[in-house]
Image: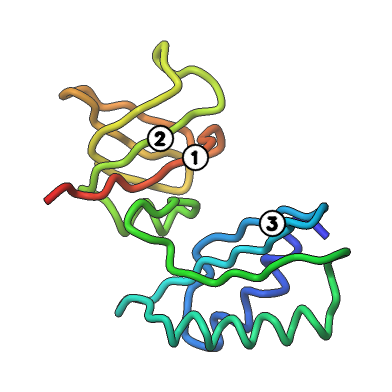
Amino acid sequence: MTGDELRKLLQPGIERMGYELSDLEVKLGGGSGFVRVFIDHPDGISLEDCEKVSLAVSALLDVEDPLPGHYNLEVSSPGLDRKLTKVEHFQRFTGETVKVQMRFPMAGRKRFRGTLVSANDENIVVEVDGKAHSLPLATIDTARLVPESR
């Protein structure tokens, strides 16, 4: 089962519980396989939220048995340096500092760190050193928030 298929299996139940499935990481094989489920909520995520979702996801995975072999299930919040994986994430964090890694060079570079200016279904705009860069969502490898230093 692919990560996208697993997301489609887990997402409806997580959303019914009132959470967003923010991200999902899967690594299978060997003795160190894992499924990491990152959940989010406008009021934040507590340890109790993680426990509640972990129990529900674990039960679903036990019944559906979509993954071969042994793995550890981990449920957590996306954290301060959260990945931005959906258009809605980019729109929610407009005005924040982001790090973006492109699959292919754009304007002679693959890495952009700056202020997220805007986002739509096709592109995000990141301002780096006073210059706006329009980056196609389809060619973003990874994008993360940069936590504010205090």
Decide which of tag 1 and tag 2 comes sooner along the chain. Answer: 2
Image height of 17 relative to 142, above or below: below
Most foreground residue, 46 or 2: 46
Mark 2 or mark 3: whose residue is earlier in sequence: 3
Question: Can you tell which of label 2 and label 3 is closer to the viewer?
Answer: 3
- Closer to the chain start, of discs 1 and 3, is 3
Label 1 residue SS: strand
Position of 61 with respect to 88 (left or right) is: right
Amino acid beneath label 1:
Thr
Identify the residue shown where x is 76% and y is 63%.
5
Residue type of the residue flagged with mark 3: Val
In the figure, 18 relative to 41: above or below? below
Q: Residue 23: which quarter of the image?
A: bottom right
Mark 1 = which residue? 142
Residue sitting nearer the eye, 12 or 63: 63
Q: Residue at x 16, y 24 (%)?
A: 130
The residue positioned 70% from the left and 81% from the top of the image is: 58
Q: Quadrant of the N terminus?
A: bottom right
Q: Is residue 49 above or below residue 82?
A: below
Which disc number belongs to residue 100? 2
Left or right of 99? Residue 71 is right
Label 1 crowding class (10 Å Cα cut-off): few <14, some 14-19, many 20+?
Answer: some
- Distance, label 1 to label 2, CA atoms, is 6 Å
Q: State the residue at coordinates (53%, 69%).
A: 21
Res 26 label: 3
Total tally of numbered discs in the picture? 3
Mark 1–mark 3 distance (CA, rounded to whole Å) = 16 Å
Alpha carbon distance from label 2 to label 3: 22 Å
Do the residues bearing badges 1 and 2 touch, measured as CB atoms within 8 Å?
A: yes
